[in-house]
Amino acid sequence: MNILITLTYYRPHYSGLTIYAERLAMALARRGHHVAVLTSQFSPRLPRLERLDRVTVVRMPPLMRVSKGLIMPGMPFAAWRLARWADVINLHMPQLDAAYIAWIGRLLRKPVVLTYQCDLRLPRGLIHAIANQVSHVANHIAAWGSQAIVSITRDYAEHSPYLRRYLNKVRAFDPPIQLAHASDADVQAFRQKYAVRPEQRIIGMAARLATEKGVEFLVQALPEILKAFPTARVLFVGPYQNVVGEEKYARRILPLLRGLEDHWTFLGIVPDVEMTAFFKTCEVLVLPSLNSTEAYGLVQAEAITCGTPVVASDLPGVRVPVTETGMGRVVPVGDSEAIARAVIEILSAPERFRRDPADFQRRTSPDTLAARYEDLFEELLSKNG
């Protein structure tokens, strides 16, 4: 079938939302479907039209930016053209354009499926407040125009102010987890590249340096961890410089790391094989997210598939991988002391948190997710006649 996927940011932008959409698009294409992704040309260096891993990517140039949203005058016209081509439309939200694209699909009698990744929580400020309200209105309009809404967990859907209004439409699908193979030699090369010494106890964090990620609480927990494990060291993977909309947050965080330089290393975005090697090198991954902008945390699921335990915030959806697998600890939101206690507990007795992740790996494979979307698409197509 012809499948149109739309979202504001696609690769090479780095976020859980874009990773989910990319893995789903590629898995559907591998299964023989024709997949087009309609997104923004958020950088002028990106091509307007590109073929990536059997997926056609169409990018619309933005006229202006409002908070993290983009205003793209050409988007409605491209959406109309591609919606006529498509058999089904899959909108990944939050996305300002989702409202009218959903109703374009409705007008053309095409099934519309929303994939709701997370609630939008922007920093304080007039522009952010306006963007928040516009996004909320757009989300509800899109929901009215859709036939089904996919959420990563039922736990998140039942606690989301948005999703719990549409629970009759919600389907809970496990997210797509896909890691490159990393051999023992690759892990050793990773350790050498980043000067990981044998005596160091490695704590991982993988995220953007962004307000909702709660980075400061791991920073605040580190002195207490160092009392128990003086050789502890945090490896932080992900964008940490010039993150869109997070410049002020970075200026607030970086001074907190003074004096901890030997115990905290920013690696930036790493290649896929190094990402797997990172998870295998870490003895524990910390996910200290603060609010419902985090709906699951793909990185913690990736760590679990590598056998690495996790310390995660007690947030709807975010707590699910740890509670389902028993591989880690769930801690109160924004509690640096609880983070320190949980990390110390895991580093003291890592064997207590090791499980066979095989079943979790099968459930969360991109092909499993693509098959579930296929079934949903076919169900909605049959209802549409």
Image (spheres, rainbow, N blue to C red):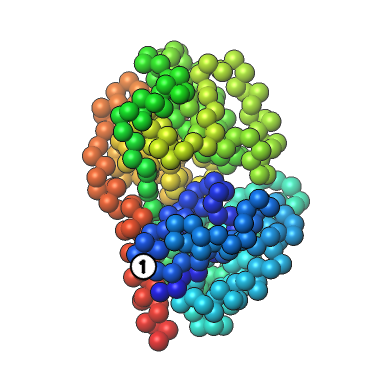
Report the residue that reaches farthest toward the bottom: 385
Give percent across and percent down for residue 192: 42, 21
144 left or right of 153 in image: right
The quadrant in which residue 181 appears is: top left
Q: Secondary structure at mark 1?
A: loop
Q: Is residue 31 visible?
A: yes
The quadrant in which residue 368 appears is: bottom left
Q: Is residue 166 visible?
A: no
From the viewer's side, name the closer residue of 13 and 339: 13
Give percent across and percent down for residue 46: 62, 53
Give percent across and percent down for residue 365: 33, 53
Residue lying at 57% horizontally and 70% vertically, measured from the top left: 142
Residue lying at 37% horizontally and 49% vertically, measured from the top left: 177
Residue lying at 66% horizontally and 44% vertically, measured from the top left: 244
Q: Which residue is mark 1?
A: 32
Q: Is residue 196 above or below residue 8?
A: above
Residue lying at 64% horizontally and 40% vertically, measured from the top left: 243
Give percent across and percent down for residue 370: 36, 62
Q: Which image quadrant: the C terminus?
A: bottom left
Three-letter code, disc 1: Gly
From the viewer's side, name the closer residue of 40 and 118: 40
Q: Residues within 10 Å of mark 1 (few under 14, many from 20)?
A: few
